[in-house]
Image: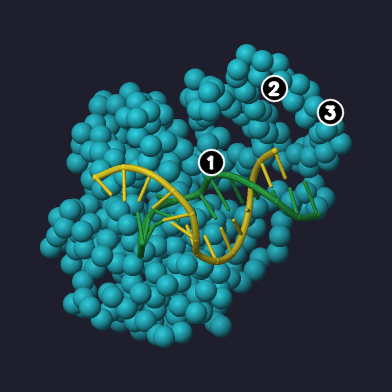
Chain colours: A cyan, B yellow, C green
Amino acid sequence: MSKGHATAWAQLPVSLNQLCLATVLRCGQSFRWKASGPDEWSCGFSDRIISLRQSPTHLHYRATFPSPPPKSAKDDTVEIVKDYFNLSIDLAALYEKWSLADPNFKKKAGEFKGVRMLRQDPWECLIGFICSSNNNISRIGQMVDKLCATYGTPLGTITHTSTTPLSPSSPSSENKTPPTEVAYYSFPTIEALTTPDVEETLKTLGFGYRAKYIYKTACMVHEDRPKGFLNTLRDEKDYKEAHAELIQFMGVGPKVADCVCLMSLDKMGAVPVDTHVWQIATRDYKFGKGKHRSLTPAVYEAVGDLFREMWGDAAGWAHSVLFTADLRTFSDRLENTKTTTTTTVKSKTKVEVEVKEEEEDEEEDEKIKLEDVKIEEVEEEEVKTIERRVRKRGANGEVKAEVVVKTEEVTERRTRRRRG
DNA sequence: AGTCGACCTTCACC
DNA sequence: AGGTGAAGGTCGA
């Protein structure tokens, strides 16, 4: 595989209030972006690999083509980038509006600026979120990778440089891993996923029951719908119509349909209600006041309506900010909210020393904490102290240090909630 | 209309 | 160290 032909880096003026790359590319909208270097991200598109970097004032981009483009061809990467990031929409103005309407949004948004919706390809979005059902973000990414490597088009390789400097096994000064060549692929075409082997192949690749969903949906789109059908849902159908069309597909329920509407079809009011959003609605907005036993279609719609009434036409965009704040990957940024966290920041070199020492003292600490728990239990209250290691990242997503986060979870009468 | 179990696999947590 | 539950749900009864 050839190394490809990279264009020079170019840039667009974009502030961090408009776009926070490291957050947007990791918050579960798209599952295909890879960290290709410190503060650098890359993803295969239809005919090129696009790489991105961000400074406080600019979004930097370049393309790597599998073969040298004809000299007459003009590089339209800038158009792709503008479109993909929905850059014509003024996110900062929307934040102002949502903050005015909702104190909780205002509180959370401070640490999560620049969270905007991508404008993805509807087909890729549809398949990506079929993979997401009853699944975790890490595995979804692995599955989409396999899907592209198996049924996509090779686009060449990108040299990845060290992105994770913290490795306990290496000496403290030696925290660089050697550069590696990583292959990139396009997302498979609709037709590529209609061959008879697809279901079985995907099963062997670990897709589980989703293998059938993907195959069936590909066949439905390819054989029973007019050409370009998914893209017509953008302009020719409104939100409700598009949603109704999407849930016809195998493996697509209301939640996945809302993801596709919001993230690829310009339906800014679509609010995908998943476990996180359900938690947010009931915990932070007291939705239903503990009434509903399950998320029925009626309740699902009511949750969306609540957010649409509060945040307005672009409620789906606002929802994404709070959804992101709720993700564990980013939870270390919120320290003034309901989670009681104490963080200990250590320098990179110190961390490794600390890790080894802590392993020896760990048991002692655990016992002390367990005794605390028992004292609390007498008062019909369970306090769990959860300790975990988190990589501290700056606004740009660069790893600054590793921290130990201690979270106290208060449980009362079976109702799990965090200390307020 | 609302409820329930099954469904693939992985990963973190106990 | 092995078991267990949950992971950005959906389907069929």
Mark 2 vs mark 3, foreground winner is 2
Between marks 3 and 1, how big is the CA–CA gap? 27 Å
Q: Numbered disc 3: what chain?
A: A
The amino acid marked with disc number 2 is Val
In the displayed structure, would residue A88 be above or below residue A124?
A: above
Under tag 1, what secondary structure?
helix
Is A168 placed left or right of A190 in the picture? right
A401 w.r.t. A382: above or below: below
Q: Position of residue A152 (x, y in %)?
A: 44, 78
Q: Residue furthest top?
A: A379
Same chain, labels 3 and 1: yes
Apparent side of residue A220 relative to residue A200 in the rendered image (left or right): left
Give me the chain letter of mark 2: A
Q: Is residue A380 above or below residue A312?
A: above
Q: Give the Cα distance between marks 2 and 1.
A: 24 Å
Which tag, 2 or 1, sits closer to the chain's start?
Answer: 1
Q: Residues within 10 Å of mark 2 (few under 14, many from 20)?
A: some
